[in-house]
Amino acid sequence: MTERKDELAANLAKVEERIAAACAAAGRGRAEVTLIVVTKTYPAGDVRMLSELGVRHVAENRDQDAAPKAAACADLPLSWHFVGQLQTNKVRSVVGYADLVQSVDRSKLVAALSREAVRAEREVGCLIQVALDAGENERGERGGVAPGGIEELADLLAEAPGLRLGGLMTVAPLTGEYAGRQQAAFERLMDLSTDLRRAHPAANMVSAGMSADLEQAVVAGATHVRVGTSVLGVRPRLG
């Protein structure tokens, strides 16, 4: 266990150096960027070690992995983020542990999240997932609403009981005009964030960038980066 913790500590230090260097290059303070460690497929023991190493934000993308892990780590001072495509039949479970759902992309999901948040007497933060590979009235390959759908969804979220509109999230697209152009994609997301904040000033969170492209996200202005592999290593896909 000590060997694994040493490995995680070394990986975390390298990621911290990357974030700090990107912040310096962009003229930003390191405190402006929050690291979220994506712990999907990794056990609760790793989450516990990460917490001991100072990590405060962790993310999961599958409820069947996340729910038992969050329960096993309920004593830790962690904020849990749900970042995967979310089906409405999983919403009750996710609302039980997630402090923030980063993948809100349709009105039906807003309604389900609101209903369950009220039932659980919780406030759940929500980010609108933006698909930069989607046509104007479509969803992206990996979920997300087209830029033209942000305003309507934001207004719904802002009025929904039990929910708090936090801002925007994206994943660098694999297809379309932004494929292979992470910097441009993240700059586009920042423009969309500026538009959103005109109507919803408190929705100032911008979640973008992962292990391979966190520097581009930080330079563009992201407030949160989601890093898994660079911290936890490569692990065979489950299921």
Image: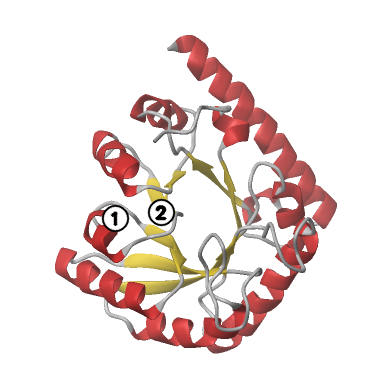
How many neighbours does mark 2 have within 10 angstroms: few (below 14), some (14-19), or many (20 or more)?
many
How many neighbours does mark 1 have within 10 angstroms: few (below 14), some (14-19), or many (20 or more)?
many
The quadrant where residue 117 appears: bottom left
- Is residue 188 left or right of 110 when viewed as pictured? right
The secondary element bearing badge 2 is classed as strand
On the image, the x and y values in percent for residue 10 come to 62, 22
Examine the rendered structure and indicate whether residue 190 appears above or below residue 82: below
Q: Earlier in the sequence, mark 1 or mark 2?
A: 2
Quadrant containing the N terminus is top left
On the image, the x and y values in percent for residue 6 come to 55, 16
The secondary element bearing badge 1 is classed as helix
Quadrant containing the C terminus is top left
Tell me, yes or no, whether the two marked residues, 1 and 2, touch with CB atoms within 8 Å: yes
Q: Which mark is residue 82?
A: 2
Which of 166 and 94 lies nearest the eye of the viewer? Answer: 94
Residue pictured at 55% horizontal, 24% vertical: 8
Q: Residue furthest right?
A: 25
Residue pictured at 65% horizontal, 29% vertical: 13
- Is residue 11 left or right of 78 when viewed as pictured? right
Which of 93 and 51 lies nearest the eye of the viewer? Answer: 93
Inter-mark Cα distance, 1 to 2? 8 Å
Mark 1: amino acid:
Val
Residue pictured at 27% horizontal, 58% vertical: 90
- Is residue 89 left or right of 154 when viewed as pictured? left
Examine the rendered structure and indicate whether residue 146 appears above or below residue 185: below
Mark 2: amino acid:
Phe
On the image, the x and y values in percent for residue 119 come to 15, 68
On the image, the x and y values in percent for residue 200 come to 52, 84
Q: Which mark is residue 173?
A: none
The residue identified by callout 1 is: 94
